[in-house]
Amino acid sequence: NMETVERLQKFVRDPRAGYRQSLSTLEHAKRAKPGLYTKTSIMLGLGETDEEVVQTMKDLRAVDVDVVTFGQYLRPTENHLSVVEYVTPEKFDDFRRIGEEMGFKYVASGPMVRSSYKAGEFYLEHMIKKERKEAEV
């Protein structure tokens, strides 16, 4: 998972995992198996700007990522990062619309969306079955 925008990676993620490394992994997965659906998730509310989120989406599309999910970061314990912003439902809708316009096959975007969001899993299952059936014809 990308987890967050490039600028915030060093604050949010383990230093062994980085923005470019995650992009490279997603790109490699697609190259290794071109029919593979790739998916990643981004937490919002950590201090990212709209422009940084859009740039992250552009970077993901550049490596042909199919599915992206956006959810609100919620601080699990006092030992974790604080929430900088509670993102509005309208902003989540804006990111969903922008992602769809960019060509993502599916965008789940909302305050309660999580990386394991079931709607995304159901969509992927449907698309995989559909494409396999079409390939048989």
Image: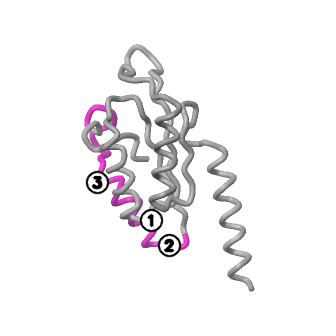
Residue labelled with disc 2: 33
Taken as a whole, is the magenta stretch helix, strand or loop? helix
Per the model, the C-alpha gap separating discs 2 and 3 is: 20 Å
Helix, strand or loop status at disc 3: helix
Please determine whether, in this image, residue 38 is positioned above or below residue 70. Answer: below
Per the model, the C-alpha gap separating discs 2 and 1 is: 6 Å
Q: Which mark is residue 20?
A: 3
**What residue is at 71 percent from the left and 61 percent from the top?**
126
Confirm whether the magenta stretch covers residue 129: no
Residue labelled with disc 1: 29
Q: Could you tell me if the residues under marks 2 and 1 are in contact, i.e. CB atoms within 8 Å?
A: yes
Bin the neighbour count of mark 2 within 10 Å (Cα to Cα): few under 14, some 14-19, many 20 and up. Answer: few
Q: Is 49 situated left or right of 70 in this image?
A: left
Q: Position of residue 62 (x, y in %)?
A: 36, 64
**Range of residues picked out in magenta:** 10-35
**What residue is at 28 percent from the left and 54 percent from the top?**
20
Bin the neighbour count of mark 1 within 10 Å (Cα to Cα): few under 14, some 14-19, many 20 and up. Answer: some
